[in-house]
Image: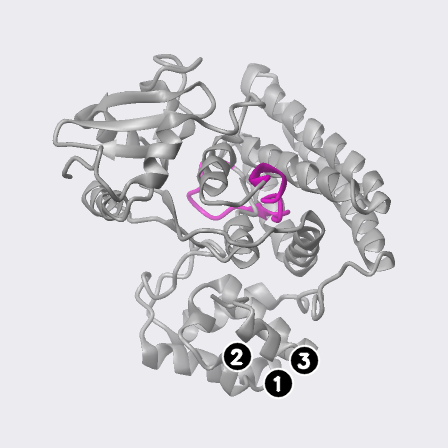
Amino acid sequence: MRDREGTADEGLLARLRAGLSYTGTTEYGSCIQQATTNVLEAQGLRGAADLIGTSWGFGYQAGDVRLRAGERWLPAAARLSGLDITRLRPGSAEAASDLEQAALADGVPAVVAVDSYDIPSPYQGTTHLMHALILVGADADTVTVLDPMNRPEPARMNRAAYRHSRGSAVVAGYDLIVSRGSVDRPVSAVDAVGELYADAVARHEADLDEFDRFIRDVEAGRVAPDVADVAAERTYAHRLLAAAGRERPELKTSAAAMDTLARRWYFAHTIAMEGGAGASGRMPKILRALREREIQVLDEFADTVRAADLAPAGAAEVPPGLSASIRSVLESQTSIAVEGLGPDDNLWSAGLTSLESVRAMMAIEDELRLEFPPSLLSRATFESLSSIERAVVAVLTGSADDVSSNGGTR
């Protein structure tokens, strides 16, 4: 990777190296959000840390090392801001290096996942945890990074040490987030609340299924009860609701409930990580109690949003079993390995072909007794499991044209 520092096309990189807007405020889990909001703020998304809390869910598939959050806030941030924001999972050091080089060559940073064991942090040399840095420069021997949580001033890392950390088992892939473009319009927290509502309601059933699978695996001792990602996602949902509540006071109760929910998740994570051998026996009961609290808080939030007429047009619950139905169709009609795919993983990158997408579309139409309109007969509709779900919901609610024109299936 050639050195990109000091070149004329690096205005954004230079601004980031000059200083960060947001630094660490929570002990666990929020490093991805903190790193990304610094990038989005530099690109013009004012108040980014109060606007990205648009995802409210769970993710857990076979082979995962922890309970993931909904992780759907990046597409929502792209829709709200007009930025081209992409989460990439290249799968190898070489592919990751190429993508990082392409980002820096375009004058944009990359938010990258590393192992906190390898970097200056409270866990250096003692604990393996996934952490996020902002990559802002590189040459043949070193990379330049920012760490919003622990060390926000620019720091150089040896390239070999960096690549080793990127490939750590706790990173579970060479993930990176790249955002291109700039924001030229204000984004309202109230509008973002509509995104949060649509996400939480539409994915509720499928998310709870994945959470239940995680609880069973914790109970069986197959996975550690790491829930930091969920705590962080709820923290940013609270920030969003608190910001929106300043404009719409009826949301203040939901903001307070979300704050309490996030604190409960952080409490659960602390018990899991620091409670010793006795914690494993307690965690299934704690997680089931959190499951009930999640349902209660979501129900109250949904009622508030509907009463305040803040629900976006066409937002509706996913039909029961939709997620499982789509996965079943893809398994029967395509050659891709559906098991282990996350909701937003790119199906084309996983090996989906155009012919297979047509077969899958026809099978979905037959099974669900619907017909995709021409506006949804596109590559974007079959980009991910989530994009297919959004398209189906759009057809069922009569808002397919809105989804197509507003980027809902991007």
Residue 23 point in image, percent of width and height: 51, 24
Which type of secondary structure does the marked residue at label 3 adopt? Answer: loop
Residue type at mark 1? Answer: Arg
Magenta includes 207? no
Q: Residue at x 54, y 25 (%)?
A: 28
Magenta part of the chain: 47-66
Foreground: disc 3 or disc 1: 3
Say what secondary structure mark 2 lies in: helix
Q: Quadrant of the N terminus?
A: top left
Instruction: Give the residue at x 42% y 29%.
Output: 131
Q: Nearer the viewer, residue 127 or 89?
A: 89
Q: Residue at x 50, y 39 (%)?
A: 41
The amino acid pointed to by label 2 is: Ile
Q: Give the distance between the C-alpha atoms of the residues marked 1 and 2, in whole angstroms.
A: 8 Å
Badge 3 or badge 2: first in the primary sequence: 2
Say which residue appears at 72% left-offset and 36% top-offset.
290
Please tell me whether mark 1 sits on a helix, a strand or a loop: loop
Q: Position of residue 378 (x, y in %)?
A: 43, 78
Relative horizontal placement of residue 5, taking residue 233 as reference (left or right) = left
* Residue that mark 1 sits on: 369
Query: Of marks 1 and 2, which one's residue comes earlier in the chain?
Result: 2
Q: Nearer the viewer, residue 372 or 53?
A: 53
- Neighbour tally class for label 3: few under 14, some 14-19, many 20 plus, Cα within 10 Å: few
Magenta stretch prevailing secondary structure: loop
Q: Answer yes or no: is residue 291 visible.
A: no
The answer to whether mark 3 and mark 1 are in CB contact below 8 A is no
Residue 115 horizontal side relative to residue 307, left or right: left
Q: Which mark identifies residue 364?
A: 2
Q: Quadrant of residue 227?
A: top right
Residue beneath disc 3: 398
